[in-house]
């Protein structure tokens, strides 16, 4: 996970280079007891082979003209026909735009919240309040997606929802949050923040609590204000965590939560809420065009991987943090 | 500590073994994956060996050619189907009627009824994995397109010859309803399915309803054209028609869409507005107009006018803000509890979304005229495709044909739809009891629900309207006293009958597998685009400015070919 | 001179501290309210007269308290079965997945493990490429798992993310230092893992158990796909069916001649919506509150660090 690790690894290997490969394997596997490690990981590997790698042969239906009534292997090869069709389809620019905007919006607006929240937690003296807040804000993490979207519909209804009642009380016309295209992204991101902030903040909070208290004392003596301490001590200390989290998020950027989006869709918000995932679902499962939907999915994956590799390279150069 | 460690180690080993075994299982196909599905007693195929039994009935193998029981030795079949109403028990064999039928026929069915929400996925998956049932069951459990596709690929079998030989009841119905045969026949001339229906003489599917009390309070008349409707709605919004001093009125509300499935018909209850402008809008935007032309509705001038009109109403707050997301429960609550809706659309007026006590306060709004004098109403037909289809998995399909035919005798078709015949005062389950008002006929015992039984528990007890029931007018008239809801629907149909279009809006187009493949691709793109654009125009406006670009985009999506496919399909059959 | 400036700084900073303290406390309290109020609202809505809820009159306390929504929920025949199944999936699925995750995370946390990189890549690939639903369905079907109680334990399987978190936990500093000590003692990997590592890793064990249990508990889609008959269906499906029974469809008016009953049903449907949310969420919330202590610790130490 860390650039330093790979350095230490190569260092560790070097002295043994004089031995033959077979000897090295024997040494590691038997003498150092690595077979035990292999045995431990074996069940998971088998699991992934059966339930993830075996079904991967299904990816080829993106290149075949598949119909559910016949086996995959009997379907005709059609090459990149479906990819071509998707790239040429008028849906493509819209899907691409929506997916990218939604995921980056979610990423960059959603990202600072847990960080700030963790900083505030860290700065609060009352440990009891901190613990209580942590407990409370974590709770939404356990709410299932279906329930969450159901709650959104209830609270945001323009006729009876509590949010609009409040808006009315201060003289604002009711807003049709769940229906209007321009509101979809905000509702999506805000509800995500509501559900995830408590969970994600724990990770940063952990990094903050491991900061050497001496640093704060030294800063106090230097006359640093609290905000300066946050800026010069807190933030740098969580940067590695932040970068790793950011990298992982960027790598999955087009994997915006399909289920959540699908549940939040209304005919009127489709101009902003139709994304790769929901379209794949509709084309594939609902209208049974499995080849086409697999092609779209595969296209998305390739973009994701490319993004991940690029950001990883950039990050390696700039911050020396990288995923591999 | 040590004990714990070794225990965990043991579990780890066990797990590894488990997975290895699981892997080994991969090689074999079809082992034990369908334990409940396989008939316990495998019916043997003994075609041709006709024999006669003691009671003089002819037999083919295990099956009697006439009479009951249908088979000598009990047989089991596995059925998968669409659960019509979620309140029904998931296993039909739990209902008394099916218990009786299965005992009488000696044909036992494992019913696997799937709720609508997951039906499409499950159906596709079972077919893709080759583990499909002996037969599909339930209205619209398969679409016409699926019937054709599955039929051509050998998943479904052609049942025409079997029907001719073993289905006297259904054959009688086929003769009685000449359109039925055309409806169930696929493009390749074969019959892979039976359609279900209830013939109560209804020929339209929706009615528009207006609050008469509000009109009276404001001294207004029932609107007859779109301009008048606009003025009435405006008055509803501004002049406090319910006289409570609050501006809480919703001039017009409806279900913008019900259901989300692209394959099934999505209900869009606002279509009467489009009828007023002279175009019958349909789920796939294909309509056969009165000159027998197949047209794409969503690029017509009438459609454009209607959409602009809707946008105007919405922009001025004359249509409920949340039409796009509300469901039927919410709308019903508005009508029943809040009572603040002026105009809405429904299957019928009485016995539906409004309270019984409010029924007189509302009245039908007739088919409206557009400014240029056009006016039409959608005709509908009552057949539902895909009600019953036998797959290649079924051994001795003739047994199933005899079974479904047995369920569709006049006597049983009525009971399948409304519950079993019971004596007067029967209050155990929902059932048909002798009518008090019409001697010699039956009615549903809705009045005798015991106090302590919840309504939803109550009507769980009969296989009502569920499955492949072919309910003819003859059978209905013979046994059932007209229900209040039917009277109400008849009333609604009468209002709109003069304006009905020549062809039903849900006309069944038939395509070849090759055409279907092409069509599905075009359809997803086109329909999605229209739906999206329509809701945007309605909520945000912009139709005038974007119209040309919209039409160009549709042409880009292959609109010409799309219409052509439908046109060919229509002309192939009708000309 | 110097002293006074230092003192003034001190005074300044203590005043600053005070302001800071008030601001941060206020922020935390607001955060708590934002999270708690919706949850609280669901609870009071589930016991209030639905008419007030629909009209949007409910805000701070229940109005016209009634338990008819819950009565209807409890009467639903499959409810208890659903709870039983869901607990089964949460407990056994959670344990199975957590155990396998722990086993695999240990080797992945070993820096000098020769298989570390290949296996990490092997696992990461699955985060990007999936075969799709049909091939997976065919595999599950051929293994004879469909419509068995085990299918959800297996298809809900192992999440790569959790594996990374766990191995990160094993890599964290204080565990690392122990590991070095054990190596000097000459412990075998098994010995070290089972006798030393697991006993001190309670927080991550509990975290994984809870994560997987919640995952199982909230799963809906896979249960829908792989289970046809109600015998093994988890609570989420049962509750969804229950809501569906109260859902009004156009067919219902045809079937229900009893108008009064229909009105009653509509109101119940509205109230049940909230009750169902409470019923579905409460058990996991309670488990979370009990396990809370370990949980925070587990995620804290397992947080994926640089």
Image: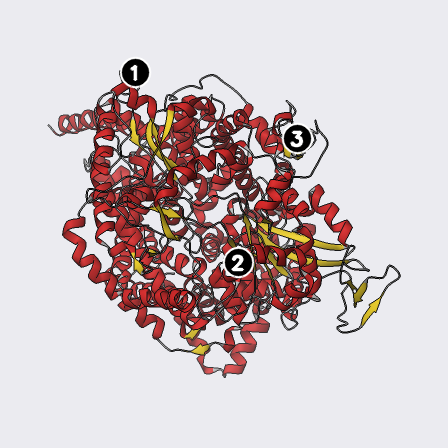
Rendered image: mark on residue B244? 1
Can you tell which quarter of the image residue A223 is in?
A: top left
Mark 1 and mark 3 in contact? Answer it, CB < 8 Å.
Answer: no
Mark 1 and mark 2 in contact? Answer it, CB < 8 Å.
Answer: no
Given the current orientation, which residue lies at the most extreme bottom position? A20
Q: Check disc 3 and report the residue beneath it.
A: B439
In the rendered image, the vertical position of residue C181 relative to residue B486, given as above or below = below
User: Is residue A41 visible from the viewing direction of this image?
Assistant: no
Image location of residue A149, percent across then percent down: 40, 40
Colouring scheme, one of rainbow, by chain, secondary structure, one colour: secondary structure
**Front in this rendered view, residue C273 or B310:** B310
Image location of residue A303, percent across then percent down: 31, 65
Q: Which of the two discs, 1 and 3, labels the residue nearer the N terminus?
A: 1
Q: Which of the two discs, 2 and 3, labels the residue nearer the N terminus?
A: 2
In the rendered image, the vertical position of residue A31 relative to residue C48, given as above or below = below
**Front in this rendered view, residue B102 or B14:** B102
User: Is residue B105 visible from the viewing direction of this image?
Assistant: yes
Q: Check disc 2 and report the residue beneath it.
A: B178
Q: Same subunit under labels 2 and 3?
A: yes
Q: Residues within 10 Å of mark 3 (few under 14, many from 20)?
A: few
Tell me the chain of label 1.
B
Residue ID at (48%, 36%): C248
In the rendered image, the vertical position of residue A175 relative to residue C139, given as above or below = above
Q: Same subunit under labels 1 and 2?
A: yes
Can you tell which quarter of the image residue C103 is in?
A: bottom right
């Amino acid at each position: 996970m860390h650039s330093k690790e790979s350095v230490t690894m190569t260092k560790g290997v070097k002295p043994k280079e004089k031995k033959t490969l077979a000897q090295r394997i024997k040494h590691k596997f038997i003498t150092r007891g690595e077979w035990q490690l292999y045995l431990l990981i074996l069940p998971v590997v088998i699991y992934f082979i059966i339930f993830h790698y075996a079904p991967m042969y299904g990816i080829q239906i993106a290149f075949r003209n598949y119909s559910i009534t016949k086996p995959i292997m009997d379907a005709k090869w059609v090459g990149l026909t479906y990819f071509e069709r998707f790239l040429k389809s008028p849906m493509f620019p819209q899907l691409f735009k929506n997916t990218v905007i939604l995921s980056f919006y979610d990423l960059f607006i959603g990202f600072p919240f847990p960080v700030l929240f963790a900083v505030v937690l860290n700065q609060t003296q009352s440990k009891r309040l901190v613990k209580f807040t942590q407990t409370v804000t974590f709770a939404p993490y356990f709410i299932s997606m279906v329930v969450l979207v159901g709650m959104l519909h209830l609270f945001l209804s323009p006729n009876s929802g509590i949010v609009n009642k409040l808006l009315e009380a201060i003289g604002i016309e009711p807003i049709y949050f769940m229906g209007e295209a321009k509101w979809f992204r905000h509702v999506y991101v805000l509800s995500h923040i509501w559900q995830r902030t408590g969970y994600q903040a724990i990770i940063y909070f952990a990094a903050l609590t491991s900061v050497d208290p001496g640093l704060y004392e030294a800063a106090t003596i230097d006359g640093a204000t609290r905000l300066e301490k946050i800026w010069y001590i807190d933030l740098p200390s969580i940067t590695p965590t932040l970068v790793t989290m950011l990298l992982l998020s960027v790598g999955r950027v087009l994997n915006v939560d399909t289920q959540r989006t699908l549940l939040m869709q209304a005919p009127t918000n489709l101009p902003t809420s139709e994304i790769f995932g929901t379209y794949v679902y509709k084309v594939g499962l609902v209208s049974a065009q499995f080849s086409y939907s697999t092609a779209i999915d595969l296209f998305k994956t390739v973009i994701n991987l490319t993004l991940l590799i690029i950001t990883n390279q950039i990050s390696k150069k700039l911050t020396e943090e990288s995923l591999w | 500590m040590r004990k714990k460690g070794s225990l965990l180690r043991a579990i780890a080993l066990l797990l590894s073994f488990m997975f290895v075994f699981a892997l080994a299982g991969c090689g074999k196909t079809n082992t034990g994956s369908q334990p409940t599905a396989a008939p316990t007693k495998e019916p043997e195929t003994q075609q041709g060996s006709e024999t006669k039994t003691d009671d003089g009935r002819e037999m083919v193998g295990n099956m009697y050619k006439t009479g009951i029981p249908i088979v000598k030795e009990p047989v089991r079949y596995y059925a998968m189907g669409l659960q019509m109403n979620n309140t029904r028990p998931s296993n039909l064999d739990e209902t008394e009627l099916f218990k009786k039928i299965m005992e009488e026929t000696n044909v036992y069915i494992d019913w696997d009824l799937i709720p609508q929400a997951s039906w499409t996925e499950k159906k596709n998956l079972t077919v893709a994995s080759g583990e499909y049932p002996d037969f599909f069951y339930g209205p619209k459990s398969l679409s016409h397109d699926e019937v054709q596709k599955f039929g051509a690929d050998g998943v479904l079998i052609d049942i025409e010859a079997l029907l001719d030989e073993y289905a006297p009841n259904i054959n009688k119905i086929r003769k009685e309803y000449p359109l039925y045969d055309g409806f169930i026949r696929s493009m390749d001339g074969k019959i892979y399915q039976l359609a279900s229906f209830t013939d109560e003489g209804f020929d339209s599917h929706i009615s528009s309803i207006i609050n008469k009390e509000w009109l009276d309070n404001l001294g207004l008349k029932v609107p007859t054209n779109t301009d008048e409707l606009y003025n009435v709605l405006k008055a509803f919004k501004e002049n406090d028609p319910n006289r409570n001093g609050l501006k809480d009125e919703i001039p017009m509300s409806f279900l913008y869409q019900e259901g989300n499935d692209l394959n099934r018909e999505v209900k869009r209850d606002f279509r009467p507005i489009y009828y007023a402008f002279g175009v019958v809008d349909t789920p796939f935007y294909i309509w056969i107009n009165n000159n027998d032309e197949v047209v794409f509705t969503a690029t017509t001038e009438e459609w454009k006018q209607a959409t602009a009109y809707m946008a105007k109403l919405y922009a001025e707050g004359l249509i409920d803000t949340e039409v796009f997301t509300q469901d039927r429960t919410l709308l019903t609550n508005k009508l029943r509890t809040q009572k603040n809706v002026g105009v809405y659309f429904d299957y019928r007026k009485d016995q539906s979304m409004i309270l019984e006590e409010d029924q007189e306060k509302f009245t039908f709004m007739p088919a409206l005229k557009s400014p240029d004098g056009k006016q039409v109403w959608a005709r509908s037909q009552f057949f539902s495709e895909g009600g019953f289809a036998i797959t290649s998995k079924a051994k001795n399909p003739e047994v199933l044909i005899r079974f479904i035919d047995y369920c569709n005798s006049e006597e049983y078709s009525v009971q399948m739809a409304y519950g079993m015949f019971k004596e007067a005062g029967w209050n155990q389950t929902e059932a048909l009891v002798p009518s008090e008002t019409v001697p010699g006929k039956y009615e549903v015992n809705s009045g005798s629900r015991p106090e302590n039984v919840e309504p939803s528990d109550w009507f769980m007890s009969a296989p009502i309207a569920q499955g492949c029931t072919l309910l003819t007018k003859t059978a209905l008239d013979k046994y059932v006293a007209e229900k209040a809801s039917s009277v109400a629907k008849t009333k609604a149909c009468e209002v709109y009958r003069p304006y009905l279009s020549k062809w039903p809006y849900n006309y069944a187009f038939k395509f070849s597998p090759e055409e279907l493949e092409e069509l599905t691709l075009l359809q997803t793109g086109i329909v999605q685009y229209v739906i999206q654009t329509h809701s945007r125009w309605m909520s945000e406006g912009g139709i005038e400015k974007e119209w040309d670009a919209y039409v160009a985009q549709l042409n880009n999506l292959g609109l010409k070919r799309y219409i052509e496919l439908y046109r060919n399909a229509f002309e192939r059959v009708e000309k | 001179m110097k002293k006074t400036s230092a003192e003034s700084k001190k005074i300044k900073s203590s005043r600053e501290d005070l302001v800071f303290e008030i601001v941060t406390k206020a922020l935390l309290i607001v955060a708590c309210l934002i999270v708690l109020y919706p949850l609280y609202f669901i609870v009071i809505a589930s016991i209030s007269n639905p008419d007030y809820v629909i009209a949007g009159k409910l805000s701070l306390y229940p109005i016209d308290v009634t338990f008819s929504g819950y009565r209807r929920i409890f009467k639903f025949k499959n409810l208890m079965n659903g709870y039983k199944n869901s607990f089964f999936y949460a407990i056994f699925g959670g344990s199975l997945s957590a155990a396998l995750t722990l086993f695999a995370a240990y080797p992945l946390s070993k820096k000098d493990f020769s298989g570390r990189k290949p296996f990490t890549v092997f696992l990461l690939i699955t985060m990007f490429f999936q075969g799709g639903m049909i091939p997976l369905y065919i595999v599950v079907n051929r293994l004879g798992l469909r419509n068995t109680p085990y299918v959800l334990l297996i298809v809900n399987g192992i999440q790569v993310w959790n594996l990374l978190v766990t191995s990160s936990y094993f890599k964290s500093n204080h565990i690392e230092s122990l590991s070095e000590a054990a190596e000097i003692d000459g412990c075998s990997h098994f010995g070290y893992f089972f006798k030393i590592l697991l006993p001190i890793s309670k927080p991550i064990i509990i975290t994984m158990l809870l994560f997987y249990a919640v995952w199982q508990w909230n799963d809906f889609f896979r249960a829908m796909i792989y289970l046809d008959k109600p015998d093994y269906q988890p609570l989420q499906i049962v509750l969804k069916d229950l809501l569906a029974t109260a859902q009004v469809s156009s067919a219902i008016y045809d079937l229900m001649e009893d108008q009064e009953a229909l009105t009653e049903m509509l109101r119940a449907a509205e109230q049940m919506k909230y009750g169902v949310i409470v019923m579905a969420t409460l058990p996991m919330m309670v488990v979370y509150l009990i396990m809370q202590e370990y949980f925070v610790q587990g995620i804290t130490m397992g947080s994926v660090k640089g």
